[in-house]
Structures are given as structure tokens and as C-alpha cells.
Image (tube, helix red, strand yellow):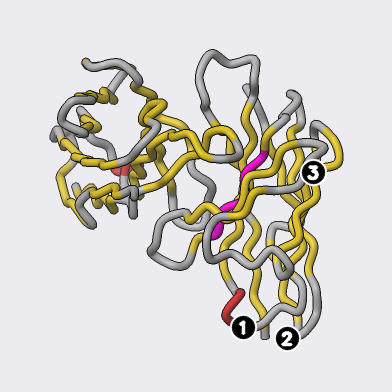
Amino acid sequence: GQNIDQPTEMTATEGAIVQINCTYQTSGFNGLFWYQQHAGEAPTFLSYNVLDGLEEKGRFSSFLSRSKGYSYLLLKELQMKDSASYLCAVSQANQAGTALIFGKGTTLSVSS
Amino acid sequence: GAVVSQHPSWVICKSGTSVKIECRSLDFQATTMFWYRQFPKQSLMLMATSNEGSKATYEQGVEKDKFLINHASLTLSTLTVTSAHPEDSSFYICSARDLQLPYNEQFFGPGTRLTVL
């Protein structure tokens, strides 16, 4: 089976740093994605990890440990506009090719 | 960047009617498109994977006769919700994969909000 866990909600203040964790158990692992989704909108791509280690992109960084089935998304210098849902998604092989399996998302609220 | 459009953005229909949702990749060819459903405050649930020119592969628990998927070209996939009922009210999102990219990134459409009365 497949299982992706991430916290339901997190809160932080402007300028702070927040880390959103994601653990997964899945077969046919082809990489892990992080997406940002504002209410009523489609997800937008943030990062992709397929090898162990840290990927940095501006204020956002993502880390992956394949042996531990663990990833985190690190958001620095938080801004109000970062208030959104953050989705961890695992790319895995299925009978149709590959597909993204999403976690339930972490709703981040940034306050001033 | 890769752009995916969906039409309509929102639709309200009566129970028992059918609704068609279009998903288009505007500036790339997408041999594979995906259809997701998202209920309020929940994550995206994959409904089916659609490969151009072949039948869609449905996830467990998704009725293929109720959710008809057609992927007739490299830039267009359609989802038809047949005999819609109020419990089908949801946010439907499509995505497309650009095979030119070195990894399996999916680009998402803006979503279609379906309300069945």
C-alpha cells in the first residue's frame, strides 16, 4: 500500500522559518514533489527531490532521505502570502506509467 | 512555462444531468494527463490516468462508467461526469506531464468547481 503523512496545520509569524515534514511509505518510488495550493486554486510546483539531500531554491528548500522515507520543506523569511496549503506528493510507478500520490496537505497560516 | 487550461471554471447542474470538463495543454504536448478530485479541506485524490490514444486507467473505487475520460489528442483530455448527483460536487483538477522535462513534473490546470443541485 501507500501512505503519506504530513501535519494538518501549522502556524508561524512573518519573517520566521518553518519546516513542514512528510513521511511516506510507497512502492516504485520515482521522486517526491512539494506543491503549494491556495484555496480554490490549482497546486503550483515548488520542488522536486529524487536523490538524498537538500535542494535549495530561493526562500524554499526541500530535503529527502529515501532510506528513511522522509522529506521536509523549509520556508525561510516567511511572508503573509505564504499562507497556503503545502502538499507532499510521491511519484510512483503504476499500471498506467507513473502517477503522483498526494498527502492530505499542511495548511500553513502566517500571521504578522 | 507549461500551461494547462480547464473549461469551464465552474459549473452548476441539476441532478441527473451530465457535465463535460475539458483539459488542454496550451504550449506542450501531453501524452499523459491526470484527473484529480478534491473535496473541501482534503487533498487531491487521483481518479484516473489518461494516455493519449488509449483507454484511461482508473484508480480503485472510481467508476469508469460514471466518469468518462477521453484523451483523443496530445493536447486535450475530457472528463464527463454522467448522471451527476450532489455527492459528485467537488473541485476537479487535471494535470499534464511534459515528456520534454527530465523528471515527472505535472502541470496543473486551474480546476473546475462542480456543484450538483
Kind of residue at disc 3? His
Q: Is residue B80 left or right of residue A63?
A: right
Q: Residue at x 38, y 40 (%)?
A: A89
Q: Is residue A36 magenta?
A: no
Q: Main secondary structure of the magenta part?
A: strand
Quarter assignment of residue A28: top left
Q: Secondary structure at mark 2?
A: loop
Q: Secondary structure at mark 3?
A: strand
- For disc 1, the neighbor class at 10 Å (few under 14, some 14 to 19, many from 20) is some
Chain-order first, disc 3 or disc 1:
3
Q: What number is the disc on residue B86?
A: 1
Mark 2 touching mark 1, by CB under 8 A?
yes
Do marks 3 and 1 share a chain? yes
Which range of residues does the magenta coloring cover?
A: B33-37
Q: Residue at x 19, y 33 (%)?
A: A70
- The answer for how far apart the CA atoms under marks 3 and 2 are is 26 Å
- The answer for how far apart the CA atoms under marks 2 and 1 are is 7 Å
Q: Residue at x 57, y 62 (%)?
A: B91
- Could you tell me residue A44's position as x and y percent? 48, 37
State which chain disc 3 sits on.
Answer: B
- The answer for how far apart the CA atoms under marks 3 and 1 are is 26 Å
Q: What residue does disc 2 label? A: B15
Q: Secondary structure at mark 1?
A: helix
Quarter assignment of residue B75: top right
Q: Is residue B35 left or right of residue B28?
A: left
Q: Residue at x 52, y 27 (%)?
A: B105
Chain-order first, disc 3 or disc 2:
2
Q: Is residue A18 left or right of residue A109?
A: left
Kind of residue at disc 1? Pro
Is B15 located above or below residue A41 in the figure? below
Q: Is residue B34 magenta?
A: yes
Q: What residue does disc 3 label? A: B71
